[in-house]
Image: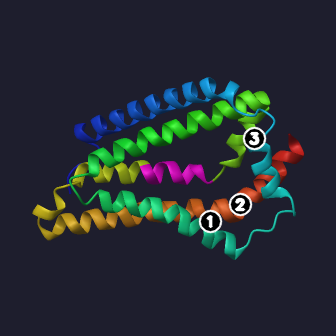
Amino acid sequence: MKNIWNSRTQASLVTLLALYAAGLAAGILFANLTFPFRDGSADVLAAYLADRLKDGIVPSREYFLYLLERRSAGFLCFMLAGMTAAARPAIWLGAAGAGFLTGAAQSMALLQSGIRGMLLLSAAGFPQYLFYGPSMVSLWLLADQKGGKIWKARAGLWKTYLWGSFLCYLGLLAGIFLEAYGNPYFLKWFFGWF
């Protein structure tokens, strides 16, 4: 088996981090430029967290299935794009888009609620993002390594790509499980402490 952590993987990771950082900067800029023009009375972060906690914390199978459908759809799109020549543009857009959304959300939380808002938004993503982030980055790196070559390659490349995608999906499933069953209890503890 070839060395997984080679110079091409390192270059791909640096490119993904640079695109994420550019998206993050664009998201921060967007949030700061549009904040004065929106109705500042609507605190989106507080509404989201209040909705998550309003009837107490009761993790449910329905919520898990809802998350499974939502999170798996994006993962499947990236996995399928990774099989085509569009793999590299798709993962580049994904990295920049993730950075943009992170920057915009964190900036809005900061502008609306100060440092407390940023901490609350970060708490809303814990512990599931410990699995979501590495799973998506691993899939993006795998797609960058194998993307577009699958149609021309031998059967071994198919197996490698599908097996790697499956392992990344297991990480995503762990994140979904933690978001559905672990995050509500973490938020309850966090609000009690904070």
Q: Amino acid at mark 1?
A: Phe
Q: Badge 2 is on which residue? A: 182
Q: Secondary structure at mark 3?
A: helix
Extreme residue in the bottom direction: 61
Residue 132: tell me if it is visible. yes
Q: Is 48 inside the magenta-drawn segment? A: no
Residue 4: tell me if it is visible. no
Q: Secondary structure at mark 1?
A: helix
* Percent x, y of residue 177: 62, 65
Q: Amino acid at mark 2?
A: Gly
> Which corner quadrant of the image does residue 110 belong to?
top right
Disc 3: CA contacts within 10 A as few (<14), some (14-19) or many (>=20): many
Out of 101 and 187, give the one closest to the viewer: 101
First-in-chain label (1 vs 2): 1
Q: Is residue 97 left or right of residue 60?
A: left
Q: Which mark is residue 177?
A: 1
Please identify the dominant SS of the magenta region: helix
Magenta residues (range): 128-136
Out of 121 and 112, give the one closest to the viewer: 112
Q: Which mark is residue 97?
A: none
Q: CA distance from mark 3 to mark 1?
A: 20 Å
Q: Badge 3 is on which residue? A: 120
Q: Is 135 inside the magenta-drawn segment? A: yes
Quarter of the image with the N terminus is bottom left
Q: Amino acid at mark 3?
A: Leu
Q: CA distance from mark 3 to mark 2?
A: 16 Å
